Amino acid sequence: MRKIAVLTIAAVALTLSACNTVRGVGQDLEAAGQGVQCSVQGTC
């Protein structure tokens, strides 16, 4: 029973850290897209 609890806690921790990583990648891609758009439009 204890092993299941430890594995569950570890899985939850990994899932939460993965969400933060994915959100960070999304923000980086959004910033890159805005930079490209700014360059194309010449509004930088």
Image (spheres, rainbow, N blue to C red):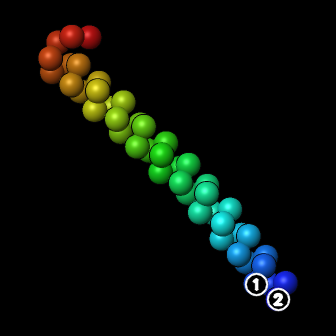
Label 1 neighbourhood size at 10 Å, few (<14), some (14-19), many (20+)? few
Residue 36 has which mark? none
Residue 19 lies, with reference to residue 3, above or below; the image says above
Extreme-top residue of the structure: 43
Label 2 neighbourhood size at 10 Å, few (<14), some (14-19), many (20+)? few
Of 15 and 38, nearer the camera is 15
Q: Residue at x 59, y 63 (%)?
A: 15
Residue 3 lies, with reference to residue 32, above or below; the image says below
33 lies left or right of 2: left
16 lies left or right of 36: right
Residue 36 lies, with reference to residue 24, above or below; the image says above
Label 2–label 1 contact, CB within 8 A: yes
Residue 1 has which mark? 2
Q: Which residue is drawn at 73% across and 78% down?
A: 7
Q: Estimate the x, y position of residue 36 in percent, counting from the top left.
A: 23, 27
Extreme-bottom residue of the structure: 1
Q: Quadrant of residue 4?
A: bottom right
Give the structural element (helix, strand or loop) at label 1.
helix
Q: Estimate the x, y position of residue 24 in percent, counting from the top left.
A: 49, 42
How far is mark 2 from mark 1, CA to CA?
A: 5 Å
42 lies left or right of 22: left
Q: Mark 1 points at which residue?
A: 4
Position of the N terminus, as image quadrant, is bottom right
Q: In which quarter of the image is residue 41?
A: top left
Q: Residue at x 65, y 71 (%)?
A: 11
Give the structural element (helix, strand or loop) at label 2.
loop
Q: Which amino acid does label 2 sit on?
A: Met
Q: Which amino acid does label 1 sit on?
A: Ile
